[in-house]
């Protein structure tokens, strides 16, 4: 143990008593003379605030961290401001060129409709671009940027307002060979507005990105993007996200996704889906077609129909599963494939287990699951007893109901956190650690402490 005098002496010497420490202007007195290559390697492990501090040390440190700082920082451009400071903008672009940019065209109340965008077209060329399109002028700018960034663009995010597109030629006749991540969203038109909007702009868009891996798309664009198998060509999409929406999608609206080639998806996120009103829905077909390759799955189900039906196939490769469901009358079943005894290996149908628990068998349906999080749609409300028992059967002595592979588990209803803090949980929670005996995260430990 250090004495109080030794600690005081150490502080007085200028050396820090803890690590990591904040980098500041006096670093030149504390650090050895490192060459730019060494500093560059170190900078990959530092957070952005420390990268900023490193730039203040000396010229060598500044040059060493600059490439990493450019790579991880984002430039937010507001067109009205830039039009008044064009000289400064040109200098700034030399620093941010080929990296992250987010463009805003002014406020919704004061849109920039008659601005000269030539400055942008001459200068912008990026790897990652995020842009909101509110009218034809902004769309023209986007097309110019896409044209100049065709060989460098890697990530593209476009958020469209509802307006009628007017153009002579679609930009998707050209390819963007390096784009691996694409995000597309369109706002729903107001009552009485033309609902076709900018459909033509999105027609055939996916074929322009032959290396696309990660796609995020709003539900109102599914019909346009996946109108036919030709519209997606030979799809390379492995990660698909349908973000949260104010109007949840019906299972029938998921039907265009069935155009995706079977067995390509490894990660699927759907955050606003209404519960199906029949067993064999587009949702089940979509899940079953990609069940063999999915390693991450996130579902958010809104109860709509009475009763609703949720069918789940087996997921032999799934490692991470997040499931949220709005409290309601939803029947949950787990499907097993049936094979012919006369011709071994030949599939003849599906077994829909209608027993008390819905037929879950963690050994069959989730043999590799490591992380399992579920809640009552954001922790609001309480699941019905039927829904709860479908996932967490009472009979923990049955090996089919025990998932030994899960290392992280959480289940949350509207009062779960309060009950855990008070140490007063209902009996149904006390058996959860027995169903997931190898889960050791804080949630499970708290339940064990509250259990008798």
Image: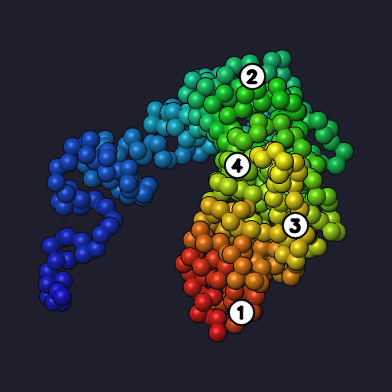
Find residue 7 and report its image quarter: bottom left
Give how far apart the Cα atoms at labels 2 and 4 are: 36 Å
* Mark 2 crowd level (few <14, some 14–19, many ≥20, 10 Å Cα): some
* Mark 4 crowd level (few <14, some 14–19, many ≥20, 10 Å Cα): some
Q: Is residue 113 left or right of residue 452?
A: right
Quarter the N terminus occupies: bottom left
N-term mark: 2 or 4: 2
> Which residue position is annotated with label 2?
171
- What secondary structure is found at the residue carrying circle 2? helix
Q: Disc 2 or disc 1, which is closer to the eye?
A: 1
Q: Is residue 124 left or right of residue 92?
A: right
Q: What x and y, as percent, mark residue 135?
A: 70, 30
| Figure check: 95 above or below 368 | above
Residue drawn at x 84%, y 32% is 194
> Which residue position is annotated with label 3?
353
Give how far apart the Cα atoms at labels 2 and 1 are: 58 Å
Can residue 110 be seen here? The reply is no
* Mark 1 crowd level (few <14, some 14–19, many ≥20, 10 Å Cα): some
Residue drawn at x 58%, y 56% is 363
Give how far apart the Cα atoms at labels 1 and 4 are: 37 Å
* Label pair 3/1, CB-CB below 8 angstroms: no
N-term mark: 1 or 4: 4
> Which residue position is annotated with label 4?
292
């Amino acid at each position: 143990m250090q004495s109080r005098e030794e600690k005081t002496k150490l502080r007085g010497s200028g050396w820090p008593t803890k690590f990591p420490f904040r980098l500041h202007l006096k670093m030149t007195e504390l650090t050895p003379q490192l060459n730019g290559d060494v500093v560059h390697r170190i900078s990959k492990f530092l957070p952005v605030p420390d990268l900023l501090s490193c730039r203040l040390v000396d010229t060598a440190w500044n040059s060493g961290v600059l490439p990493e700082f450019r790579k991880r920082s984002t430039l937010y451009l507001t067109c009205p401001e830039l039009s008044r400071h064009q000289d400064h903008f040109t200098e700034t672009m030399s620093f941010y060129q080929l990296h992250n940019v987010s463009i805003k065209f002014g406020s919704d109340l004061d849109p920039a409709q008659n601005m000269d965008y030539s400055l942008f077209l001459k200068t912008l060329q990026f790897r990652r671009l995020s842009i909101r399109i509110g009218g034809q002028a902004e769309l023209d700018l986007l097309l110019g940027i896409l044209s100049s960034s065709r060989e460098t663009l890697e990530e593209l995010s476009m958020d469209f307002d509802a307006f009628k597109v007017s153009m002579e030629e679609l930009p998707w006749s050209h390819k963007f060979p390096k784009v691996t991540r694409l995000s597309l969203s369109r706002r729903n038109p107001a009552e009485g507005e033309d609902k076709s909007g900018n459909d033509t702009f999105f027609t055939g868009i996916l074929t322009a990105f032959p290396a696309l891996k990660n796609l995020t798309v709003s539900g109102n664009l599914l019909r346009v993007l996946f109108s036919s198998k030709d519209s997606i060509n030979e799809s390379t999409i492995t990660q698909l996200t349908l973000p949260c929406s104010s109007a949840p999608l019906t299972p029938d609206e998921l039907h265009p996704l069935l155009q995706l080639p079977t067995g390509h998806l490894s990660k699927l996120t759907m955050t606003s889906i209404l519960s199906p009103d029949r067993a064999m829905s587009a949702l089940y077909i979509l899940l079953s077609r990609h069940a063999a390759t999915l390693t991450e799955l996130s579902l958010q189900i809104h109860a709509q129909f009475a009763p609703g039906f949720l069918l789940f196939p087996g997921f032999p490769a799934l490692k991470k599963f997040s499931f949220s469901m709005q409290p309601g009358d939803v029947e949950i079943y787990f499907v097993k494939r049936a094979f012919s005894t006369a011709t071994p290996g030949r599939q003849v149908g599906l077994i829909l287990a209608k027993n008390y628990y819905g037929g879950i068998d963690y050994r069959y349906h989730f043999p590799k699951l490591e992380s399992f999080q579920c809640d009552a749609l954001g922790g609001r409300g309480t699941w019905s007893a039927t829904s709860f028992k479908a996932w967490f059967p009472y009979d923990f002595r049955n090996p089919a109901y025990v998932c030994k592979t899960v290392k992280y588990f959480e289940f949350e209803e509207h009062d779960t956190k309060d009950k855990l803090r008070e140490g007063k949980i209902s009996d149904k929670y006390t058996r959860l650690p027995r169903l997931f005996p190898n889960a050791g995260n804080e949630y499970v430990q708290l339940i064990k402490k509250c259990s008798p």
